[in-house]
Image (spheres, rainbow, N blue to C red):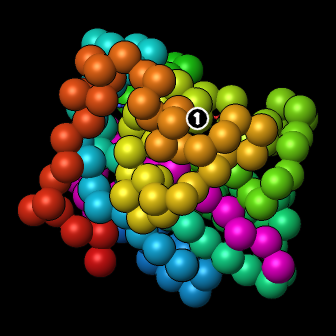
Amino acid sequence: MSRAVLSLGSNLGDRLSYLRIAVEGFADVLVAASPVYETAPWGVTDQPDFLNAVLVVESPELDEWGWLRRGQQLEQQAERVREQRWGPRTLDVDVVSVDDVRSEDPELLLPHPGTPSRATVLIPWLAIDPDAVLPGHGRVSELLDALPPGEIADVHLRSDLSLS
Ligand SMILES: Nc1ncnc2c1ncn2[C@@H]1O[C@H](COP(=O)(O)OP(=O)(O)OP(=O)(O)O)[C@@H](O)[C@H]1O
Ligand SMILES: Nc1nc2c(c(=O)[nH]1)N=C(CO)CN2
């Protein structure tokens, strides 16, 4: 049995449909899906705004590599083309954490090293799990409190959009 937290992002084409591809792809293992947020791009800032969301998923069969593979299959289903690092994409599925697993394999870093500094992950995650903890980093609420206010202001709840 493993429980994973997955981060979804899209900033090309019909962004909501691409996020829904991921939600449908994980429907059999879905524990919770966050609201959808519209977010200003970080990393490469000269690109369209993203829609971001977080899923909590659980399976008796999948380990951390299984979650990565399933996410990558769904990225392919969304016709994702790998181009620029941090560049635009139809669908990004990042494995944020899997239970307390630590991994330094570059193909699967766990917890995902970007998480503590990304309001685009922390805010949706906290919305579905107010007690969330990022293994090795502490409470998600405290990580969020430590971020510059400007980054939090860049994350807007889109209550008019739904993942289902
Ligand atoms: N926790 C993880 N979740 C998803 N992919 C990971 C993880 N750790 C390492 N990777 C590897 O990252 C590689 C590139 O991923 P991707 O192109 O989505 O990066 P990115 O989204 O641009 O940047 P970032 O990983 O900082 O969000 C993949 O080949 C994948 O094996
Ligand atoms: N707001 C936002 N910006 C990004 C995102 C993302 O999901 N949301 N993903 C990136 C590449 O992983 C690069 N920049």
Judging depth in this view, the residue of 44 and 96 nearest the camera is: 96
Asked whether 7 falls inside the magenta stretch, the response is yes
| Residue 26 seen in this snapshot | yes
- Could you tell me residue 14's position as x and y percent? 23, 53
- The reply, left or right, for residue 81 in relation to residue 36 is right
Q: Amino acid at mark 1?
A: Thr
Residue shown at 32% from the left, 14% from the top = 45
- Dot 1 falls on a residue whose secondary structure is helix
Quadrant of the picture in which ligand 2 is shown: top left
Q: Magenta stretch containing residue 10, yes or no?
A: yes
State which region is magenta: 1-18
> Which quadrant, please, contains the C terminus?
bottom left
In the image, residue 91 above or below residue 61: above
Q: Which residue is mark 1?
A: 115
Q: Residue at x 80, y 84 (%)?
A: 60
Name the residue: 67% across, 76% down: 58
Seen in the image, is 154 located left or right of residue 42?
left
